[in-house]
Amino acid sequence: MFPLSPVTRREVLARLGGGFGGLALSALLGDFARAGDTAPVADLLPKSPHFPAKAKAVIQLFMHGGPSHVDLLDPKPILAKYDGKPAPTEAADDEKITGNLLKCPYKFNKYGESGLEFAETLPHTAAHADDIAVIRSMYTGHRNHEQALWMMHTGLTVAGRPTLGAWAAYALGTLNQNLPAYIVLPDPRGLPVDGIRNWSSGWLPPVYQGTPFRSEGVPVLNLRAKAPRSADVEQGRLQLLSDLNADHKARHPGELELDARISGFELAARMQLAATDALDVSRETTPIQQLYGFDNPTTRPYGARCLMARRLVERGVRFVQIFMSGQPWDAHTNAAAQTRGCCDQTDLPIAGLLTDLKQRGLLETTLVFWGGEFGRTPGAQGKDGRDHHPYGFSVWLAGGGVKGGQVYGATDDFGYRAVTDRCSTADLHATMLHQMGLDHSKIVYRHNGRDERLTDVFEPKILKALLA
């Protein structure tokens, strides 16, 4: 007779075929007791803001590579006068010399009652001029993509810090316990530059990192079992795995990665009932799908992600990011065609998102942010490109208590430097948090003996002129 050998937790999980859904333990059974815990457990339960919030959710439309402010949102007629000529001494780029000045290849027009100016390549977004506040005086701390991305997402030009979305999830939790607080919609064609660090929780507990959802095919892989099981069998499997995880957790108290993994499994069980519904855009009417550009292969991929974002914030998700593959706005050559191509993909879907949010009464409580990590040089790189430009560029905000139809700040006549009401990344972050009911100085996490904040050592200002 063979002696019985002890069965490890790993072996049981393997024998039970524990996919993502199969490992979703106690959410369908009730939370298990976290016996032996001595450290606080990170969670995504709803938390009260510091003061009444204007924005319950954020949708970040991130434009990887650096859109050209002088070609889209910040008209500089003087560039046409000096096209192909050296910049005057007072306007030269002291940090990195580029070629002669390069005029904008597009016409600018005024839109809405406000007369806000947009390039002709953004006609659909421009139709929402009276809902949009353009910040023309942004500046940042680095001209390389990665460092500028870290600054825009995490507040400093160093890697490994939590992103704005992770801080929001940490501070506020989620209004829907069946979906993550922080969801990412990457381009199905590939990841953006810097990959998954764009939605990292850094040294915050991993439960606060962004959860990527697919916008084509199955939204979340391995969410359901390949073969259906009876309710009794499924209940028994979940109960066994719940007991095993409870025992394992009791023997390893205070391990945040373990907390996050178990929380993820539990969330996966709840998502079996909620995620498919939230991301099933086929349930939308044909007119709504057309609003987002589903009838055009150029606009459909980005439109699908925009529509998913609306469905997610409608269901209580706190922070949604939409990314493009690679760095499509990085127009070092043939800037006119490359910039127009990006506008062709995104302009109509973004306008559809704003229209849809407004029609449903969601724009009032959803803050929409558009922008990249920096702008592009007024001077040419080579014959017809534009280089990276951190000294002055444009982004825009809409909804979430922002007063539209206005411009905040200004660059100089050539678009080189932010000169009026200069807006740092910390200013932008503090203002976005403020609209979510959060005081940036009070969102603190102790790490390596230091109280860390998104805005770190800076003393940012809230951009009150932007706020309704």
Image (spheres, rainbow, N blue to C red):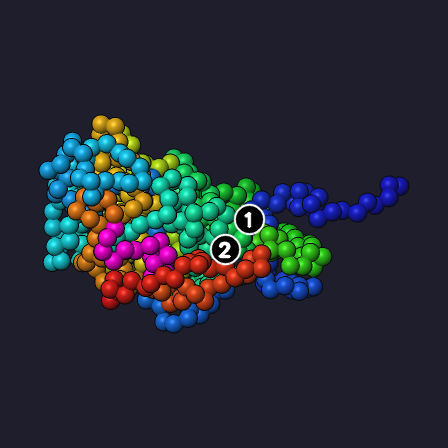
Graded by Cα atoms within 10 Å as few (under 14), some (14 to 19) or many (20 or more), the crowding at tag 1 reads many
Kind of residue indicated by mark 1: Gly
Evaluate whether residue 64 shows in this view. Answer: yes
Say which quadrant the N terminus sits in: top right
Residue that protrudes farthest toward the bottom in the picture: 51
Residue that protrudes farthest toward the top in the picture: 383
Residue 38 or residue 216, whichever sits in front: 38
The residue drawn where x is 58% and y is 44% is: 19
The residue drawn where x is 66% and y is 63% is: 37
Spot occupied by residue 384 in the image (x, y as percentages of width and height): 22, 30
Q: Is residue 401 shown in magenta?
A: no
Q: In this view, does 264 lie to the left or right of 311?
A: right
Q: Is residue 242 left or right of residue 188?
A: right
Provide the residue span drawn in magenta.
Answer: 418-433
Graded by Cα atoms within 10 Å as few (under 14), some (14 to 19) or many (20 or more), the crowding at tag 2 reads many
Spot occupied by residue 3 in the image (x, y as percentages of width and height): 86, 44
Quarter of the image where one finds residue 172: bottom left
CA–CA distance in space, label 1 to label 2: 20 Å
Q: In this view, does 291 lie to the left or right of 308?
A: left
Kind of residue indicated by mark 2: Tyr
Q: Is mark 1 on a helix, strand or loop?
A: loop
Task: Point out which mark residue 21 bears.
Answer: 1
Spot occupied by residue 80 in the image (x, y as percentages of width and height): 12, 37
Tell how many labels: 2
Task: Point out which mark residue 208 bears.
Answer: 2
The residue drawn where x is 82% and y is 45% is: 5
